[in-house]
Amino acid sequence: MCDHYMAAMSYAQPALACLQAAQQECYKLGIPLRTRHREVAPNQYEVAPLFGTATTQIDQNIVVMQIIEETAANYGMAALFQEKPFNNINGSGKHNNWSIGVKEGPPVNLLNVKQIADASGSHEIFPIIMAAIISAVDVHGDLLRMAIASPGNDFRLGACEAPPAIVSTYLGDDMTAYLEAFANGSDAPYHPNTKMLEMGIKAVPPLEVPAEDRNRTSPFPYGGHRFEFRAVGSAQNVSLVNTVLNTITADAFKQVADDIEAGKAPKAVGEALIKKHLPKVVFNGDNYDEANQQMLTDRGVWRIDSGVDAICRYSDPKNTALFESMNVLTAEECHARESIMLEHYVGTVEIEVNCFVDMLNQHVIPAVKHANVGALEDVQQAVVTLEDALAAVHAEDDPKAKADLARVLRLETMVDIRATIDAAEKLVPADLWTLATYSELLFLDQTTNAVVNDFLDG
């Protein structure tokens, strides 16, 4: 149990020293990493920076990734930012915690109900802001899905703390009830409930905590003073994610402002948005439950299972009109970026297929031959199948069709072949199997290699 979630980092392997060194390098560049702990999967770790402005945090996030990769190599390790590097255990993502504030005057977080009320003297502003954001998620959920589209996320989304590709939002029962009451004429302020958390230790008194934790199955939960976009992939540059969040919110705010300036009462504008969008896009339940997923699909919540299909929402007329109206991107730029994302999708799959073929030719086939066990012909045929499928991808000229073929190759063909290889691995003796096993890769507290041994020896 030494690898479980939030356990102390072990001195039996160099991961702790590696992360400490990475933190130190980040500090030298003025990047404060506030937390450092184990995550759910074996040998999985998390670091979290302090909050800051979007542009600064986006840049620092990329720098942190580079530092971690380079530092890991110095300790005989490899830092994997792929979204789903190991089968049937938690993948990796980025939790894009997002809030908005004012540029002038005292600092006010517009998602902090108390700060807004204290600064304005009004309890009506916060629910109108929330109503606008909810409407933006409902109308432009396809863009949120587009912003997180990648081959790795196609594997990751839908289980193990990764939300499904259905873009609802979670508010919690207290916030939902408050907004519904506001929409029905109530002017009562928002007061979230709390609960007492017993630690089970006599020496530690109970702690008063919020009654509702953020929903880990939701792609975009409200977590108190911020929304958390949990569906972002771990290998992603989060610039597009935040561009989309800021653009769709700015558009929603503009529509609210236009209605108010046209003579409508602010409260009436907020009430109308809540009544229209909250019943559809807000969902506080279990997003992994297939019945709930079907229910949300039937509601009309944006659901795009394919990352390729999601990428192609970039150039949809609704979305190019949005980006142009906000002076963010032209229609031509949207089409160009869509093409680049499709090329990246195909290129990523191509690299992985070629790596798979090399592993089969250089490791699996020789091991099966040497051991004289397993379905050798099936393994050899797997190489032919992969090479033929990749050739079909190369032969396709249409970018969307090419990416569709790449997606099938990665999510279906390679998965089926993997089952054949797993079956062979079970039969080949350990001393003849030349690829690292899951236990060797994941449980470094119990398994070491020569490089790690050199590190431990000083």
Image: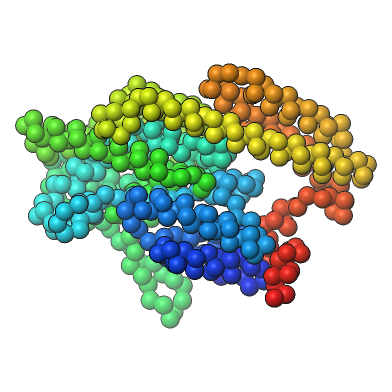
Q: Which residue lies furthest to the left in this view?
A: 263
Q: Can residue 69 be seen in this view?
A: yes
Asked if residue 223 shows in the view, the reply is no
Counting from the top left corner in percent of width and height, residue 447 is at 73, 63
Q: Is residue 379 above or below residue 449?
A: above
Relative side of 100 to 118, left or right: right
Residue 155 screen position, x and y as percent: 57, 39
Quadrant, the C terminus: bottom right
- Which image quarter: residue 421? top right
Q: In the image, is residue 198 above or below residue 156? A: below
Q: Which of 374 and 356 is in front in this view?
A: 356
Left or right: 157 as drawn, with respect to 118: right
Q: In which quarter of the image is residue 269?
A: top left
Q: How many marks?
A: 0
Query: In the rendered image, which quarter is residue 452 located in?
Result: bottom right
Closer to the camera in the image, 8 or 453: 453
| The one of 213 and 391 positioned closer to us in this rendering | 391
- For the point 43% across and 63% down, the residue is 29
Taking the image as shown, residue 230 lies to the left or right of residue 40, namely left
Residue at point 58% right, 58% down?
A: 70
Q: In which quarter of the image is the N terminus?
A: bottom right
* 378 vs 60, nearest the viewer: 60
Residue appearing at x 74%, y 34% in the figure: 417
From the top left corner, tell me how far across and down residue 345 is, in percent.
Answer: 55, 33
Q: Colour scheme used in the picture? A: rainbow
Taking the view exactly as shown, the residue that stands out farthest to the front is 29
Give the residue drawn at x 23%, y 51%.
Answer: 101
The picture places residue 188, in percent across and down from the top left corner, at: 14, 50
